[in-house]
Every structure is written in C-alpha cells, then in structure tokens.
Image (cartoon, rainbow, N blue to C red):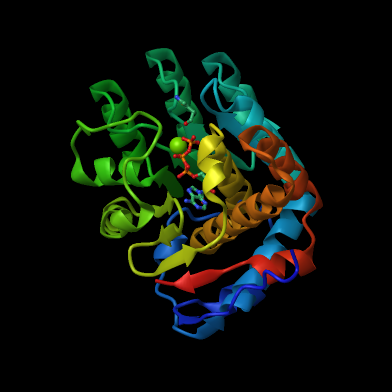
Amino acid sequence: MLERIRSRTMFTGYNKKCYSCNFSPFSSNLRLMEHKTPTPTTTTTSSEWGSQAWRQLSRVRSSSPLIQCITNYVSMDLMANVLLSSGASPAMIHSLQEIPDFTPHVHALCINVGTLTPDWLSAIKAAVNTVNEMHKPWVLDPVAAGSSGFRFKACLELLALGPTVVRGNASEIIALHNGALDTNSRGADSVHESTDAVVAAKSLAQTSGSIVAVSGAVDIITDGQRVFGVHNGVPMLQKITATGCSVTALIAAFVAIDPSHPLEATTSALSIFGVAGEIGMISAKGPGSLRMHLIDSLNTLDEHTFLQLVKITNL
Ligand SMILES: Nc1ncnc2c1ncn2[C@@H]1O[C@H](COP(=O)(O)OP(=O)(O)OP(=O)(O)O)[C@@H](O)[C@H]1O
Ligand SMILES: Cc1ncsc1CCO
Ligand SMILES: [Mg+2]
C-alpha cells in the first residue's frame, strides 16, 4: 500500500486562514451561506488539503457529531455503519411525530429521497425546517432525481430550502440543473461521468447557494466559483449499493464539525471515503467483501497512510 504514493498537485483558491481559526464544533451561530463569503486566494498543496482532511476526521472521531439521517430503506444499514466507523453517531429517525423532540439536538441532518413517499416528504420538510431555524447544516442526496415527476418536484422543493451541501451522481446533478425529467434515467445509477457534470454543478451551486458535489471516478466539489477534484476511490464502489448515500452522510458529519467551511468539509469527507475504499480494495475479493473492508478501513485509517494516498486537485 505504501508504495502507492500519490503525486502532490499545486493549486490555488483555498482560504488557508479559515483553517487556523479556533472553530467551536457545535457553536449555535452557524451561517449556512457563509461559503459565499469572498475569500482571498492563496496557494495550497494537495498535502495541505490532506492534513486538513485528517484534522477534520480527527474532530469527527473526537467529538462524535450526532447525525440524523432520513434516508432510504436500502441505505440505512451501510450509512449507519459508515458513520459509526468514522466516529460519528447515526440516528435513522424519520417519523414526523418524533422530529419536534429529536431534531433540535442533532448536529447535522442528512436527507435522502431514495425511497421517497408523500409521508416521508412531510417528515423531511419538518426536519429541514427545524435545522434551518437553528442554523444547523443539512445535506441533500437527490437519489434518482430525474426519474419521476414526484421525486423531481420534491428535490426542487428541498433545494429551495437551502441545503448546505447537495451530493449526487452526475445524472442526478445534470437533471436538477436541466430542470427536466431524465428520459434515459437508470434510477439510482448514473449514466454520465462526473466530469460531464462540472458545468451543471457550478451552475447549480450558483443558483442554489449550496455546495454541490458530484461523485464518480473523480469527485467534483464546487461552490460555483472554485472547483476541486478528489481522485480517490475504486470503481468497485459503484457495485455496492448505497456507497453514494453513505458518503453523503459522511459529508454531513464533516459539515457538522466544520459548518463554516462546507466546501472544504465536503472535499475532506469524499477524500477520506475514497482512500478507505482504496485500502479496503487491497483485501477485497468483490463487492461483498469490499463493503466489509470499507467499514473496517474507515475505522482503522491512520494519518500516515491517508496522507500518502489522498489526492485533491484544483480543476
Ligand atoms: N469509477 C470510480 N472510481 C473510483 N471511485 C468511484 C468511481 N465511481 C464512484 N466512485 C466512488 O464511489 C462512491 C459512490 O459514488 P457513486 O457515484 O457510485 O454514488 P451513487 O450513484 O449516488 O451511489 P448510490 O446511489 O448507490 O448510493 C463515491 O465515494 C465515489 O467517489
Ligand atoms: C437502489 C436504490 N433504489 C432506491 S434508493 C437505492 C439505494 C442507492 O441509492
Ligand atoms: Mg445516489
């Protein structure tokens, strides 16, 4: 594994100053739109990004943010295990009746429309309104957004409520950007490469005010101005259902501990997940065992190994 040292790429656009501030993980005065604040341009290496991602994972591990996940039936197990193995606390609580008692206590909310029904949509909106009122971060996974009118309308309504981050695959982000149903939809699976969605992601970030992340061979992360690429992960992650859903939940955990820097937190979460996939793949025999080794790798990942494998570039 250690010989797989990645090259370090120079890039610009990162506000280093933000990372030297004394951030209080769970302060109540979070501003969801803070990433829109203009930042001075400095030069930062991929290894500095790697160090920052490691610090953020360390904070997830030490502070164990509580992440409420209103997600689909398929992803509940893997998502909860990915959060647990990364150090966060998952809570798969989705009943409308429980939201007034529980949601005010969470550090971030993960919303996923994978198996959406009208009842669940009501619960989702109630939970989103609660965290919005409390200025806490929330992340939207628009699973199969372009596959049906009901789902598409729901995704647009949720987008209008101002998610901190939207993470989807390329087809989902392109459908949201196009504002139309996807007649070639394959449901939860993408028919596009992530790099096909750069323009759509930037535009969607500009119109929504959200950070937009597109997963794929290269994960794309943008605030509408800056665009970063995470070159980690293995293709077999696509053969495990709900790895995308789970990395969205991991983004929620990272945004929970650094809500003032959602662009950077999202980039970090995707890189941690991708590196864990690469390490897991060394021992895996196929998707089934990769799923197990991915969870193990998230649990045991160490700084030295991560810093050797992480690759983040300016796109
Ligand atoms: N070709 C690839 N090479 C490396 N990593 C990949 C590749 N494709 C996807 N990944 C990684 O797999 C994870 C899931 O991404 P994917 O795009 O498959 O999500 P998704 O389609 O939303 O999945 P799901 O809906 O099943 O949860 C991400 O961490 C991504 O970086
Ligand atoms: C396969 C599938 N269908 C609805 S949600 C889901 C999990 C991956 O998004
Ligand atoms: Mg998905």
**Residue 155: image x %, image y %?**
33, 33
In the rendered image, which quarter contains the C terminus?
A: bottom left
Question: Which quadrant of the figure shows ligand 3?
Answer: top left
In the image, taking residue 149 as reference, residue 121 lies left or right, namely: right
114 vs 133: above or below? above
In the rendered image, which quarter contains the N terminus?
A: bottom right
12 vs 261: above or below? below
Where residue 29 sits, quadrant-wise, is bottom right
121 vs 55: above or below? above
Where residue 73 sits, quadrant-wise, is top right
**Residue 60: image x %, image y %?**
72, 52
In the image, taking residue 158 as reference, residue 104 lies left or right, namely: right
Q: Is residue 136 visible?
A: no
Nearer to the camera, 68 or 296:
296
Q: Is residue 41 visible?
A: yes
Question: Which residue shows up at 37% across the image and 15% down it?
Answer: 118
Question: Which residue shows up at 34% across the image and 58% down it?
Answer: 195
Nearer to the camera, 104 or 89:
89
216 vs 221: above or below? above
**Residue 311: image x %, image y %?**
57, 69
